[in-house]
Amino acid sequence: TVGPVEELRRRFSSVERSVEAQLQTFEAAQGRLRTEVEAACARAEAAGEDVRMLQGTVVEAGERLGSLDDRMGSQEEEHAQLSTQTDRLTQALAEATTSLRAALESATAEARAALQQAESRLSSRLGAV
C-alpha cells in the first residue's frame, strides 16, 4: 500500500506537471501574442508611412489645384480683356464701314453731278457747233 506521504508526492507531482504544462501553454500563447502585437505594430507603422505619403500627395494635389485655379482665373481675365477688345474693334469696324459707305455715296453723287455737268457742257458745245 501507498502511504500518505507517497500519495501527497504523487498528487504534488501531478499538479506540478499540470502547472508546468499550463505554464508552457501560457508561454507559447504569450509568444504568439507578442509576435502578433509586433506584426500589428509593424503594420500600423507601415500604415502611418502610407498616411504620411498620402498626406504629402494631398498637399501636392492641393498646391497643383491652387495653381490651376490661379491660371484659370488669369485666363478668364485674359478672355474678358480679349472679348472687350474684340467688341471695341467690331464697333470701330462698323463705324469705319458706315463712314466709308457715306464717303463713297457722297463721292459717287459728286462724280455723277460732275459727269452730268460735263455732259451738259459737251451737249451745249456740240449744239453750238
Image (tube, helix red, strand yellow):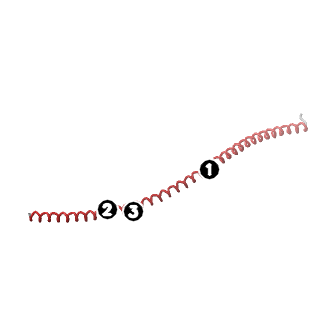
| Residue at image mark 2 | 97
Q: Quadrant of residue 90?
A: bottom left
Mark 2 or 3: in front is 2
Q: Quadrant of residue 107?
A: bottom left
Task: Mark 2: give few (<14), some (14-19) or many (20+) Cα within 10 Å.
Answer: few
Q: Nearer the viewer, residue 18 or 23?
A: 23
Earlier sequence position, callout 1 versus callout 2 = 1
User: For the residues marked 1 and 2, what is the alpha-carbon distance in whole angstroms?
Assistant: 60 Å
User: For the residues marked 2 and 3, what is the alpha-carbon distance in whole angstroms?
Assistant: 14 Å
Mark 1 or 3: in front is 3
The spot of residue 89 in percent (x, y) is 38, 60
Earlier sequence position, callout 2 versus callout 3 = 3
Task: Mark 1: give few (<14), some (14-19) or many (20+) Cα within 10 Å.
Answer: few
The spot of residue 34 in percent (x, y) is 74, 43
Q: Secondary structure at mark 2?
A: helix
Q: Secondary structure at mark 1?
A: helix
| Residue at image mark 3 | 88
Q: Say the numbered circle drawn on residue 64.
A: none
Q: Nearer the viewer, residue 62 or 19?
A: 62
Which residue: 36% across, 62% down?
92
Amino acid at pointer 1:
Gly
Q: Nearer the viewer, residue 9 or 82?
A: 82
Do the residues bearing badges 1 and 2 touch, measured as CB atoms within 8 Å? no
* Vertical placement of residue 72 versus 22, above or below: below
The residue positioned farthest toward the top in the image shown: 1
Which residue: 84% across, 39% down?
16
On-image quarter of the C terminus: bottom left
Q: Say the numbered circle drawn on residue 56.
A: 1
User: For the residues marked 1 and 3, what is the alpha-carbon distance in whole angstroms?
Assistant: 48 Å
Amino acid at pointer 3:
Arg
Q: Nearer the viewer, residue 38 or 121?
A: 121
